[in-house]
């Protein structure tokens, strides 16, 4: 999968801050989309970009909804963007709360360029990782669906630690059939060992 | 009734006294006003129980008094009637006075708590946080713009146009920061206000130029209805603009919190002559006032918004009143959807020209 330029969403109620950060990100080749408030962001939200990593720079103190509340709302809406908080009066309890809720970083305004860029790289990397895992998961799920019922049953038997002989007896088929199905299952799932199979089914939460 | 059950000892004592008084009252002659002693029951109940229970007990006492009067046999009927009425009046009065006194005590308690909270809030920490936020915004813009400017210049080939624009932002924001510091300094100094006669419409137009950009960014329609031939007003020009700026910002914030998004916002600013004064109004179609918000709008450290100090309108009203002007709020009616708020500032005219 090829990746296009990463995208940084920015929500801050101060126009000058938005312009400055957007420009700074542009100067290092990052695309930014700026919003004046959380309502504005949600109104224009059309889902995360398909082929690029993304993250969200979120001001804590804004009219209307606070950044911390918005972080919760995003989670409830299953919008999976790594969040970096920026605040002009970062106090300790607030930053603790933000980090506990899964924020990537918490930057006090004004921040150094390097702090901001480091946090953004970190967030984008986390997003890439999330996306990769999700893609792998989906691929694995597709491969699992491509197994026929007999192959799935044999694979499950193997994972449960039963011997070929026992599986054959369970389903009233020959041991050769079990071996063939077992080999087919591993081939279709593109796995090599039983240990791989155990891990794969665990990831799919099938047992 | 729950508090009657929660304090069984007290309740038994009260009921026992009521029964005793009832017996004495019933079996004594009409002339002896035993029923007056029910006031003792009411007073004791006030000590131990909530208002509802006190009222229930009071009604019970009145009922028993009447019952005794009906059952009582000996003595003069007329005197008995008068005594009964006096007793009932005494019971009602003691219950009413007792309840009112207790309500007053509770109100005093709440007020004391509020005062404590305010005196704590006025501590240095609060002010520092607010100043840090005010100054932090332009500083952030300056720092990020400076970094961007350097990067545009260091690129191969360099991008002087973009660097120039970033540099312009640095200058603008530096001025903004220094204005804020100037304002804080003036606040700390408690600088004397300088009322003067000036054209209100002109001052309004100047202020709104500053807001226009933000309004269009937020997709808010800014409507101006300025009366022609308005006499000059007598006010501190800078403070007037501060008040107007505050009202417009509040209106924008209120529009931003309307749940249905996107919401075509509207802010209408109007000037008009009003019976020997000049009326300036700022109306919006935002969320308006929730529940009891309108009563508290001008209270210090009260805000419907998160993360603000709740001082904006308090200071605005102080500024208005120090010039003999009035500032108040009403729920919007004429702007569409019948929601939102209108703030009115009634300004005195320049006395030299108004005659």
Image (cartoon, coloured by chain):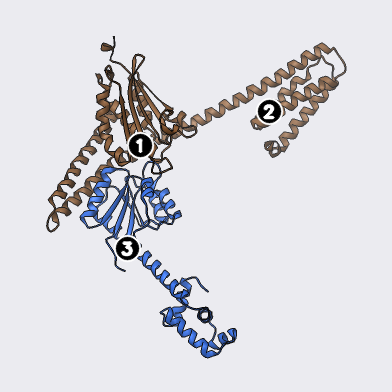
Chain colours: A blue, B brown
**Closer-to-camera residue (B84/B236):** B236
Separation of marks 2 and 1 at Cα, in angstroms: 49 Å
User: In the rendered image, which quarter is residue A162 located in?
Assistant: bottom right
Q: Which mark is residue A51?
A: 3
Determine whether the residue tagged by mark 1 lies in a helix, strand or loop: helix
Which label lies toward us, 3 or 2? Answer: 3
Is B289 left, or right, of B44 in this rendering? left
- Residue B27, how many percent across, how many down? 86, 21
Chain ID at mark 1: B
Q: Are marks 3 and 2 in contact (CB under 8 Å)?
A: no
Separation of marks 1 and 3 at Cα, in angstroms: 36 Å
- Residue B114, how many percent across, how many down? 47, 32
User: In the rendered image, which quarter is residue A140 located in?
Assistant: bottom left
- Residue A206, how many percent across, how many down? 51, 72
**Closer-to-camera residue (B254/A62):** B254
Q: Determine whether A45 is above or below B290 in the image.
A: below
- Dividing the image into 4 quarters, which one contains the N terminus of chain B? top right
Q: Earlier in the sequence, mark 2 or mark 1?
A: 2
Residue pictured at 32% horizontal, 41% vertical: B218
**Which residue is tagged 1?**
B252
Q: Determine whether B298 is above or below B5 in the image.
A: above
Q: Determine whether B6 is above or below B27 in the image.
A: below
**Which residue is tagged 2?**
B55
Separation of marks 3 and 2 at Cα, in angstroms: 71 Å
Q: Which mark is residue B352?
A: none
Is B31 left, or right, of B188 in this rendering? right
Which label lies toward us, 2 or 1? Answer: 1
**Closer-to-camera residue (B245/B338):** B338
């Amino acid at each position: 999968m090829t990746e296009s330029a990463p995208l940084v969403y920015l929500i801050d109620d101060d126009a000058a801050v938005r312009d400055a950060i957007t420009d700074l990100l542009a100067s290092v080749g990052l695309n930014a989309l700026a919003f004046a408030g959380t309502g504005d962001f949600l109104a224009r939200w059309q889902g995360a970009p398909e082929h690029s990593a993304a993250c969200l720079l979120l001001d804590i103190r804004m009219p209307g909804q606070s950044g911390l509340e918005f972080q919760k709302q995003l989670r409830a809406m299953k919008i999976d963007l790594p969040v970096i908080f920026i605040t002009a009066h970062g106090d300790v309890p607030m930053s603790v709360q933000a980090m506990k809720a899964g924020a990537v970083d918490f930057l006090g305004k004004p921040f150094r360029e390097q702090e901001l860029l480091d946090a953004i790289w970190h967030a984008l990397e986390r997003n890439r990782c999330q996306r990769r895992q999700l893609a792998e998961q989906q691929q694995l799920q597709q491969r699992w669906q491509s197994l026929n019922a007999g192959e799935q049953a044999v694979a499950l038997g193997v994972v449960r630690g039963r011997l070929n002989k026992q599986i054959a007896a369970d389903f009233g088929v020959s041991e050769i059939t079990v071996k063939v199905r077992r080999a087919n299952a591993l081939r279709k799932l593109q796995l090599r060992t039983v240990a791989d199979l155990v891990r794969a089914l665990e990831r799919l939460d099938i047992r | 009734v729950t508090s009657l059950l929660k304090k069984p000892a007290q309740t038994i004592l009260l009921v026992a006294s009521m029964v005793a008084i009832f017996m004495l009252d019933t079996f004594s002659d009409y002339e002896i006003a035993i029923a007056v002693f029910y006031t003792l029951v009411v007073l004791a109940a006030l000590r131990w129980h909530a208002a509802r229970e006190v009222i229930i007990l009071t009604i019970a006492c009145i009922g028993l008094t009447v019952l005794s009067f009906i059952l009582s046999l000996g003595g003069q009927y007329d005197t008995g009637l008068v005594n009964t009425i006096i007793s009932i009046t005494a019971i009602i009065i003691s219950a009413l006075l007792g309840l009112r006194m207790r309500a007053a005590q509770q109100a005093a308690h709440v007020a004391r708590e509020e005062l404590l909270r305010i005196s704590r809030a006025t501590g240095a920490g609060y002010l520092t946080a607010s100043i840090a936020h005010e100054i932090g915004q332009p500083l952030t813009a300056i720092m990020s713009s400076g970094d961007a400017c350097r990067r545009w210049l260091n690129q191969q080939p360099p991008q002087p146009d973009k660097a120039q624009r970033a540099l312009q932002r640095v200058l603008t924001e530096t001025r903004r920061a220094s204005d804020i510091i100037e304002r804080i300094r003036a606040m700390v100094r408690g600088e004397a206000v300088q009322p003067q006669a000036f054209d209100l419409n002109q001052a309004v137009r100047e202020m709104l130029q500053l807001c226009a950009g933000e309004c269009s960014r937020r997709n808010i329609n800014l409507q101006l209805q300025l009366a022609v031939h308005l006499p000059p007003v007598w006010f501190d020009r800078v403070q007037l603009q501060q008040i107007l700026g505050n009202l417009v910002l509040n209106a924008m914030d209120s529009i931003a919190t309307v749940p249905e998004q996107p919401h075509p916002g509207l802010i209408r600013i109007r000037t008009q002559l009003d019976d020997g004064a000049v009326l300036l109004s700022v109306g919006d179609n935002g969320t308006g006032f929730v529940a009891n918000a309108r009563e508290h709008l001008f209270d210090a450290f009260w805000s419907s918004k998160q993360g603000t100090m709740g001082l904006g309108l308090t200071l605005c009203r102080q500024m208005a009143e120090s010039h003999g002007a009035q500032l108040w709020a009403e729920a919007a009616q004429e702007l569409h959807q019948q929601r939102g708020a209108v703030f009115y500032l009634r300004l005195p005219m320049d006395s030299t020209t108004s005659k």
